[in-house]
Image (cartoon, rainbow, N blue to C red):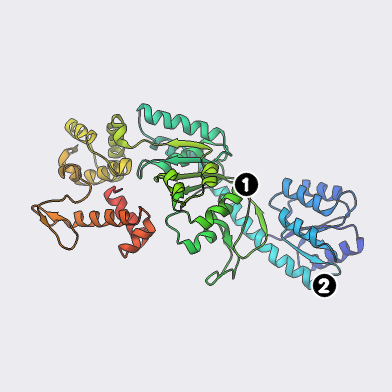
């Protein structure tokens, strides 16, 4: 970390001199000012990490200075010097974003402790800036990749693309993206971000169903060191990570009710508090969310807050299932065949016309993700450069994504078999059954199956499965 740069603003020359001497002995870079106007001149010309600010000043009071500093220089951490009886002002200062404070008369050790606490925030901010700078360098390339992956010429997908462009132009408005699993909700969210003015900042995707409820608040807002058992160090939450950028909350319908009220407050106040801290941190984040659930039903069953739903649903995009835009199947098939053949250094010369017709009649319960996974497997199996129906095993099972109810019942799995004992079929069935019993909550389904969430997610993607 570079040398800490500190600006002192106090109308007492004695205090300014005393603090300046102390900080210079600690090898900090120090700027000094006796008035707010002088301080703002320094801030305009010099990069500053921490500001030491007296609450009682000429020209304007310290609270007004604090608000202006946070408005114009949001990355500067402010430590406030207060007098006795200033508790109401201290509370207001904390709401305005002050990092720390100490009382007059003060000891130099108190100041040093306040600086040490605050410099941790400075280090985290510098780390975030480094990440965001790196992200901006690859932003254009990512934008091109995202746009090219949204494949289709149907009226339905053209409508989605048009809505994406409109959503991107309103880059503060929350957007709710709905659609069955596998339709490409995250891809649409990334597209909105990369088409918006926020595209030089971070896009952070978070899966609400993948986080245990007891850790959810920490993931969302971050935590202080020692905030709870296991919190060995400070953690930046999703909101801080996505500052000035976009936060994508996938499977928003699985967010715990307690967290829903806290998320609503953040959307209204534009401020977060880390777990274990009373300090409010201003955040500028665009929220995109997605779900495959019936949210109106969730609201009626008191599983989701209606007021939060209206907040998130300020702009609405629905992605139709692949079976409702079959004219896009051939384009998607060619796109993924070209992609995977290139990645595997294989040549696909032709796609059999009868294969395309068969795929158009396939139900695609897993939507585009299912077609993508099927095509990857087909390219692996293809040896003569021509993709045929025989390379798509799901089509050979008449498009059934799970086990069929046949003649002879299986007492263990409540399914039956006609000719073979198909282990893959059983695995798909058990995954579907666990999802149904857990109301399609992946975390609960993985517990029923006695496997990790990531293992379940991999298997669902492997089969293009969404039961």
Q: How far apart are labels 1 and 2 at the CA level? A: 39 Å
Horizontal side of residue 130 vs 84, given as left or right: left
Q: Which mark is residue 268?
A: 1
- Number of residues whose C-alpha sits closer than 10 Å to that of mark 1, classed few (under 14), some (14–19) or many (20 or more): few
Residue 262, image quadrant: bottom right
Q: Quadrant of the N terminus?
A: bottom right
Q: Position of residue 171 (x, y in %)?
A: 57, 37
Q: Position of residue 405 (x, y in %)?
A: 15, 51
- The residue sitting at 64% across, 63% down in the picture is 277
Front position in the image: 74 or 27: 74
User: Dot 2, how many residues are within 10 Å of its Cα: few (below 14), some (14-19), or many (20+)?
Assistant: few
Q: Please tell me whether mark 1 sits on a helix, a strand or a loop.
A: helix
Q: Which residue does the image show at 40% across and 28% down from the upper left?
A: 158
With 283 as the anchor, is 427 left or right in this view? left
Q: Please say if the residues under marks 1 and 2 sit with CB atoms less than 8 Å apart.
A: no
Count of marks overlaid on the render: 2
Question: Would residue 382 be visible to someone looking at this image?
Answer: no
Q: Nearer the viewer, mark 1 or mark 2?
A: 1
Seen as rendered, the residue at the extreme left is 419
Q: Nearer the viewer, residue 420 or 10?
A: 420
Which residue position is annotated with label 2?
Answer: 107
User: Which label was assigned to residue 385?
Assistant: none
Picture coordinates of residue 178, whole percent (x, y): 42, 41
Where in the figure is residue 48, as x and y percent of width and height?
74, 54
Q: Can I make out residue 281 in this image? A: yes
Mark 2 or mark 1, which is nearer the start of the sequence? 2
């Amino acid at each position: 970390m570079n040398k800490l740069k500190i600006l002192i603003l106090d109308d007492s020359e004695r205090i300014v001199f005393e603090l300046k001497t102390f900080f210079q002995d600690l090898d900090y870079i120090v700027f000094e000012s006796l008035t707010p106007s002088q301080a703002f001149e320094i801030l305009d010309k010099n990069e500053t990490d921490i500001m030491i600010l007296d609450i009682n000043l000429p020209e304007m009071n310290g609270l007004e200075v604090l608000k202006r500093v946070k408005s114009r220089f949001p990355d500067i951490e402010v430590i406030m010097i207060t007098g006795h009886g200033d508790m109401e002002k201290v509370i207001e200062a904390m709401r305005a974003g002050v990092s720390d404070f100490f009382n007059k008369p003060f000891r130099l050790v108190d100041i040093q402790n306040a600086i040490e606490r605050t410099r941790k925030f400075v280090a985290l901010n510098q780390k975030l800036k480094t990440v965001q700078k790196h992200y901006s360098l690859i932003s254009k390339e990512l934008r091109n990749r995202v746009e090219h992956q949204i494949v289709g010429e149907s009226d339905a997908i053209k409508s989605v693309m048009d809505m994406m462009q409109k959503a991107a132009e309103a880059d503060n408005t929350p957007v709710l993206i709905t659609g069955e699993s596998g339709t490409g909700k995250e891809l649409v969210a990334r597209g909105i971000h990369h088409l918006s003015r926020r595209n030089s900042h971070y896009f952070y995707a978070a899966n609400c169903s993948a986080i245990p409820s007891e850790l959810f608040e920490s993931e969302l807002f971050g935590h202080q060191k020692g905030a709870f058992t296991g919190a060995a160090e400070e953690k930046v939450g999703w909101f801080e990570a996505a500052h000035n950028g976009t936060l994508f909350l996938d499977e928003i319908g699985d967010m715990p009710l307690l967290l829903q009220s806290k998320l609503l407050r953040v959307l209204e106040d534009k401020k977060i508090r880390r777990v274990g801290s009373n300090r409010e941190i201003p955040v500028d984040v665009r929220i995109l969310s997605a779900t495959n659930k019936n949210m109106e039903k969730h609201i009626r069953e008191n599983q989701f807050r209606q007021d939060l739903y209206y907040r998130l649903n300020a702009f609405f995009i629905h992605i139709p299932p692949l079976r409702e835009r079959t004219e896009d199947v051939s384009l998607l098939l060619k796109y993924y065949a070209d992609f995977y053949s290139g990645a595997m250094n294989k040549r696909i010369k032709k796609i059999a016309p009868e294969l395309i017709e068969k795929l158009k009649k396939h139900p695609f319960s897993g939507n585009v993700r299912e077609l993508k996974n099927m095509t990857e497997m087909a390219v692996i199996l293809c040896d003569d450069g021509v993709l045929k129906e025989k390379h798509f095993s799901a089509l050979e099972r008449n498009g059934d994504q799970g086990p069929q109810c046949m003649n002879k019942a299986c007492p263990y799995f409540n399914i039956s078999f006609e000719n073979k004992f198909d282990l893959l079929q059983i695995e798909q069935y058990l995954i579907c059954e666990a999802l149904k019993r857990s109301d399609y909550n992946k975390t609960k389904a993985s517990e029923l199956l006695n496997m990790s969430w990531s293992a379940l997610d991999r298997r669902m993607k492997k089969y293009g499965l969404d039961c």
